[in-house]
Image (cartoon, coloured by chain):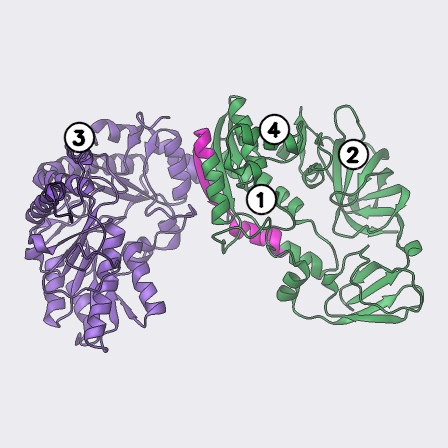
Amino acid sequence: MRVLAAMSGGVDSAVAAALAVDAGHDVTGVHLALSPDRQTLRSGARGCCSVEDAHDARRVADELGIPFYVWDLAERFTEDVVEDFVAEYAAGRTPNPCLRCNEKIKFSAVLDRAQALGFDAVVTGHHARLAGGQLRRSVDAAKDQSYVLAVLTAGQLGGAVFPLGSMTKQRVREIAAERGFAVATKADSHDICFIPDGDTRGFLARRLGEQPGRVVDAATGATVGEHTGAYGFTVGQRRGLGVAVGDSRPRYVLGIEPVSRTVTVGTADLAGVTEVRTAPPTWTGAAPALPIPAEVQLRAHGTPVACEVTAGDDGGLRVLLGTAQRGVAPGQSAVLYAPDAERGDLVLGQGTVLATA
Amino acid sequence: MSSSQAVYLDHAATTPLLSEVLAAMTGQLGRVGNASSLHASGRAARRVAEQSRERLAEALGARPSEVLFTGGGTESDNLAVKGLFWARRDADSRRRRIVVSPAEHHAVLDSVEWLAKHDGADVTWLPVEPTGRITPGALRAALGSGEDVALASVMWANNEIGTVSDLAALADVAHAVDAPLHTDAVQAVGQVPVDFAASGVDALTMTGHKLGGPMGAGVLLLRREAECTPLLHGGGQERDVRSGTLDVAAIVGLQVATTVAVTEREDRADRLASLRDRLVAGVVAQVPDAQLNGAPLDDVVAGGPGRLPGNAHLSFPGAEGDALLMLLDARGVECSTGSACSAGVARPSHVLLATGADPDRARSSLRFSLGHTSTDDDVDAVLDVIGPVVERARRAGMGRR
């Protein structure tokens, strides 16, 4: 196959590109420049697509003897990922920008352009298994990224290659070291690439400005605190609420009402939900006949719980949880899996969380 | 595809080393000697360096004392722009204005912008003709009385679109108001007639690796009476304007390359121009809406070529330059979208924008540059693939809506 390897400058995508070359594919490397004002040097383990990262990616491509280019997708990324991120928080929801980037950038803008240029697929260093068109969890549970890939449709998965899904992160680093890649020991990237200092609340405050409002206790209706922006809160959040209540029981964010800027908090017994309603889902294969039993994961790195998936309103899903869950935030993705300990849990699809009960 | 099989049409970026240059350099690399030393080895090295200086001066119409060896075109541009600015301003504090073309190479542009940002320079940007040329009238208008001008800088031939300006006429205009004129002639030497004394310019940048010489070796021709403040301080090897131990092997390589390029210029220019004309005609036959950027192929300025003979710069409406480059690279054809950027991110060419082209046209351009190893087979190789490549690139669009 003629494949395009998306190379971030990190160790995963470097090894993925190398394995694609080993597999006999005709590989071209591309680094995606996603930030409109790129830093020259990386800052810590955060951020992405600095000029230094592009250099790291180019070094690997040169060692592999494959062509390498930088594609400027800053405009698309800003529009589809960063602005979406800000708008979602402004609407009281908690978005997942990595998921959005896979959906709109890597397996849409990049894949479309690659296919138009004559490539068959895009290779990435995601930790997930993809065989026979079926998306499964990585063997490395700690590094598994199937959650942020579940949004891909069968058509998008048909143009994706994930060479790393059947190996651990440690093995990836070993391969990089065996090949003498300078990125073998490069730190993993964390957090949100377009917020290099890791201060999401500060980033949102700069974008959305101060929007003071009240923090209200769900049980009493009493105002128990003030805040400078509801966007600084996430459903399920416990720390940093700044509330004064009469008892010592911890409070959790139960809900965010963006128009009145009201953040509702409550005790643990009120924070659990047993039903999740989603927007119309995407399926990684043919849409199943509902209802179906499944496991659902409600946030990145969350623990999956048994559930029954039934049809909801307006084409969405109603997911009935076997055990009550805390911190199910609207805007997050409810990713559905069919458990399979042998071959890796199969990703069925996902729906964006709209509401809980 | 390995580089030995590649069709290399990026000679304006760099061109293969001449075999006679390789021989001269390897011979010198085997000898010990610092050209500043007083003993026999030093004297032998100095003899080679000074012979090279004399031969270079002869090839370029300069006096040997006007040849300053530098580390390349970028250093020469920096030295001329900053050095002339500092010296002229120090002599008269009113002289803080730099008159410059916006289509210059970044070595000039970024030096000027640095002076504007950090050292109080005022910048007057010259209007650029749609062909990319700077006219004497435009320079005259921009200079005004000239009393506040530190220097003017206009390139001899543009590195992207190959347009040649009339430097002798521009120097006359500058001298009429006592302003010094620098020219970046990196692309011009060996391609069009360049005579330093006859042109009248005060400072001229050239470099070796565009002519079949080594990288990292360049020259600033600087008139004897021109005051120029050094960038690099130290041993004062080059007229106290540039310091650093002379790289004698690189210097002899630079000299041999320059002498060969200047001696063979006319024959080579005729050959390259006819190859280039066939390339452009063939591309346009297959892609009828392709647009030639820069001056017409048969343009004439000051009795010589108005466009570099090896330059073909074309826009392909609806296609992205970097997609075209990638598709051609995959088919073994090596060319360029213009000046390379360190980050590798495609930006619309500042040169085309300066000529008044719209950003889409600037983004959809490709430069094919021919040189001493170019053949009919190279042209055929482009013509074999260009039609389908443009069609495919047009379908690919770019990450914008």
Q: Nearer the viewer, mark 2 or mark 3?
A: 3
Q: Are marks 3 and 1 on the same chain?
A: no
Letter of the chain that mark 2 sits on in the rendering: A
Identity of the residue drawn at 59% across and 54% down: A196
**Which label is found at residue A337?**
2
Query: Distance between the Cα atoms at labels 1 and 4?
Result: 19 Å
- Whether residue A65 appears in magenta in the rendering, the answer is yes
Q: What separation in Å lies between label 2 and label 4 (alpha carbons)?
A: 21 Å
Residue corresponding to mark 1 = A105
The colour one sees for chain A in the rendered image is green
Alpha carbon distance from label 2 to label 1: 24 Å
Image coords of residue B185 (percent x, y):
18, 51
For residue A163, which numbered disc appears in the image? Answer: 4
Q: Could you tell me the amino acid type at mark 4?
A: Pro
Chain of the residue under label 4: A
Q: Earlier in the sequence, mark 2 or mark 1?
A: 1
Q: Colour of chain B?
A: purple
